[in-house]
Amino acid sequence: MSAQSPSDAQFGRVGLAPLIAVCTGYFMVILDVTIVNVAAPAIGRDLSITLTDLQWIVDGYTVAFAGLLLLGGALGDRWGHRRVFCLGVGVFTLASLGCMLAPDETVLTVMRVVEGVGAALLVPGSLALLQQVYATPQARARAFGLWGAIAGVAATAGPLIGGVLTNTLGWRWVFAINLPVGVACIALTLAVVGPSERNRSGAIDWLGQGAVVVTVAALITALNEIGRQGLTGPLVIGGIVLTLVGAAVFALRERFAAAPPIPRAMLASRPLSGGTVVGLLFNFGFYGMIFAASVYFQQREGLSATMTGLALLPAMAVTMVASTLSARLSRRYEHRQLMLVGLLTAAVGLGVWAVSGATPSYVILVVAMVLCGFGTSFTLTGATATVMGAAPSGFTGTASAALNTARQTGSAAGVAISGSLVAALGLTTGVTAFMAIGASGYLLALLVTALSIPRRRPALETA
């Protein structure tokens, strides 16, 4: 009989229940990023609202989520990650109930923002709790790989579930499905995940955290408004000004505050800062590609929302395979090698679409999307393990928040820039231009990986 590997032994002792509990909450968050996009037209018709109102129902969630992630991580370090994770799930679940019952667009927008607050509380804790439960590097890499796979499953299921629920039961049911999931997540987490240590000495710099919120929220707002208002629009210019002001205040707090928003040891860590930049770049390419492809299939090919979800399915479904495979290969190969392979694969995928011409066949586009999706998820496991492994003791939540803030900002930038290119250059040229830019982003991430992620070969495990 073959010997059991350390990671398998760790999973055998701890079991999959903690992983399932934590990932259930994360699944809700990622699902809500995509599921509401499909339901948006029905929401607009039912509530008789303008396109601007509808966009903020979608974007309010993203702005609150990305802007408050770093604060959510700091609160987890301070108060305990299990406590803050469960609080986040509770806030998210109650806000989903508010969305389901919302009588008008104002209440719905406010509840979507509150959902984003709940997501910002629970996401940093999800990685920190996995770091807490699974002790060996190999077991953690496997857990992080499955955590990344859950994101792929949720992103894949979102358009399909949203389309089916909206077309059958109505748009309010895209929020109703969060209610039983949220209750089950809290109950299971309290049952199978132990209490977390608290970094009682870690003070929270509220001015610095406020600067982060302003910077991220203003940047995402400006990026989202470029496609509608152009570069000279008031919200775009105002967003850029607020971004610069917020960034300046953040930099001053990092330099002079006794307890800066991001510990200085984290900023000085090349693996941690490099892995965070890589996360921003690959989310930029992947989610920009998904948005551009969705517009392409609906406007050029005339597909419905449900059929567009099916057309995107290969790119999304492959992410689960890639995350799981990357986690297994991390037992024998260093994260740096796997990240380089993944980023190069994704760059080739977007490059294929960029050079495929004005009327590419669906087969060519499937190849391009699959390579991009596979490469992105293949990279995610190594980037996550690198960032979390480099986190100083007592600051795992902050490290997780920094990575996820970068990723959410990258996603928003990818969607905004791809949409702006389509609006400025036309559908086919705009989509092709973004694919070329996205491929360049993956190559830049490859360079960052080569320069910042150390060569550190894990101990070989017996098969």
Image: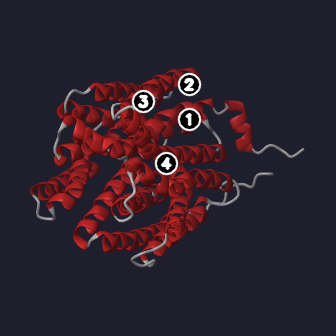
Closer-to-camera residue (302/218): 302
Tell me the mark number nearer the camera, choosing from 4 and 1: 4
Q: Are marks 1 and 2 in contact (CB under 8 Å)?
A: yes
- Quadrant location of the N terminus in the rendered image: top right
Which residue appears at 51% of the width and 53% of the height? 313
Q: CA distance from mark 3 to mark 2?
A: 24 Å
How packed mark 2 is, by other alpha carbons closer than 10 Å (few <14, some 14-19, many 20 or more), is few
Q: CA distance from mark 4 to mark 1?
A: 28 Å
Relative to residue 90, is residue 271 drawn left or right?
Answer: right
Residue position for label 4: 156
Q: CA distance from mark 1 to mark 2?
A: 9 Å
How packed mark 4 is, by other alpha carbons closer than 10 Å (few <14, some 14-19, many 20 or more), is many
**Disc number for residue 132:** 1
Residue type at the position of mark 2: Gly
**Disc number for residue 178:** 3
Report x, y in % for residue 178: 42, 30
**Disc number for residue 194:** 2
Report x, y in % for residue 33: 38, 44
**SS category of the residue bearing label 2:** loop
Residue type at the position of mark 3: Asn
Display coloring: secondary structure
Q: CA distance from mark 4 to mark 3?
A: 17 Å
**SS category of the residue bearing label 3:** helix
Closer-to-camera residue (299/397): 299
Does 182 sit above or below residue 392?
A: above
Which residue appears at 45% of the width and 72% of the height? 353
Is residue 283 visible in this depiction of the protein?
Answer: yes
